[in-house]
Image: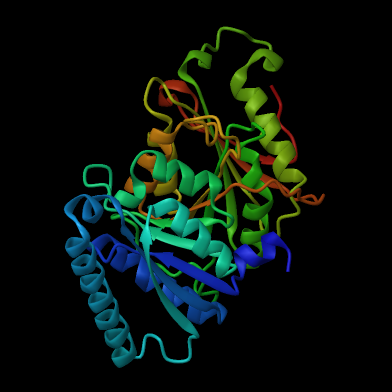
Amino acid sequence: MSPITAALKPQSLLIATDFSEASEKALRHSLALARFFESRFCLAHVVSSLGPTMAGPDAIAACEEAVLRETAQLEASLMRSGALNGIPHKFIIRHGELWPELREIIREENADLLVVGTHGRHGIAKLFFGSIAEQLFRQADCPVLTFGPHSHDRPWFDTSSAHPTFLFATDLGRASLHGLPQAIAAANQFGATLAFLSVIPGASSNRDSMNCHEDPQRRTLERLLQLADNAGLDLTPELYVEFDSGAPASEKILQTAEKIEADVIIMGLHESALPGVISHLDLATTYDVVCQAHSPVLTFNCSSEHGPGSQPTRVTISPPLQAGVISTDGLGAKC
């Protein structure tokens, strides 16, 4: 199975949990995904070695015993409710440093998809704090699906419902485009409309030039058109070009996702070890999107290529200062 196919139809699904309220939503979705795709389901919890170790061996033993008891209670509850019926499953408890242990579990279980939940920006779980988050997003051997506190419960993978909409955020750079092949494949698999969004820095919003080749808005539009027309999408894609106008890029992503009622936000991440660099958006921006979005966020750090194709494209350009909306239908743009 190819990496793209595995990510979109996981044979092995892993949820990392801290048993918090934030993890409950991710757990519900994980079980629904596992049932829908007939995947193996694995729940993992890592008991941090730092606090208990400083407190002594008795504290370590007490902490591990409490976690084992809570895990057993959760499994029994899920069995009684029927949530695990017919789903091959495993519960794993490890003791040590969070990311090294979790990475090892991902590899041991051959996980095709990692699912996590977060409390949000002002109550962030330990799983999403500092270097742990950066390692999780950039170094995980599989795609990561994140459910924030505001994410909805719409099951986009239920193909019996109306056509979903997926939002792919990109700056058209190499790093962010790593997620494009998966975004295209996901849209086609689920019969979804794929919306492309590129946010142009506010410094580029000067529209004094009348030459379309010097106009950043037009350049961005033409590049998006090229990507969309060669994507081989089953449904007509939508393109959105926004200026940040001094606001964080995350605000434009979140506003666009809300406007089009996106079922999933997809982002391609950088594989580099450079600190703080995971895409065209910095780590803080990614946090904002993950923690404030009303839809789950799917992140990839792979670099597969997508095949050629052609599809007419609906384009929406939002000019600076919200002066109006220009809609363009077809395969090209004119100045």
Q: Quadrant of residue 9?
A: bottom right
Q: How is the image coloured?
A: rainbow
Judged left or right of residue 248, residue 140 is right
Q: Quadrant of residue 269?
A: top right
What residue appears at the point 62 percent right and 60 percent down from the top-left corner?
186
Q: Does the rendering let one see residue 328?
A: no
Q: How many marks?
A: 0
What residue appears at the point 40 percent right and 39 percent down from the top-left corner?
131
Front residue of 263/45: it is: 45
Measuring from the top left, give residue 109's x and y in whole percent.
55, 70
Measuring from the top left, give residue 25's x and y in whole percent.
32, 66
Measured along the vertical axis of the image, is residue 297 above or below residue 27?
above
What residue appears at the point 39 percent right and 47 percent down from the top-left corner?
290
Measured along the vertical axis of the image, is residue 119 above or below residue 8?
above
Q: Quadrant of the C terminus?
A: top right
Judged left or right of residue 270, residue 230 is right
Judged left or right of residue 239, residue 96 is left
Measuring from the top left, give residue 12's x and y in whole percent.
56, 73
Measured along the vertical axis of the image, is residue 102 above or below residue 155?
above
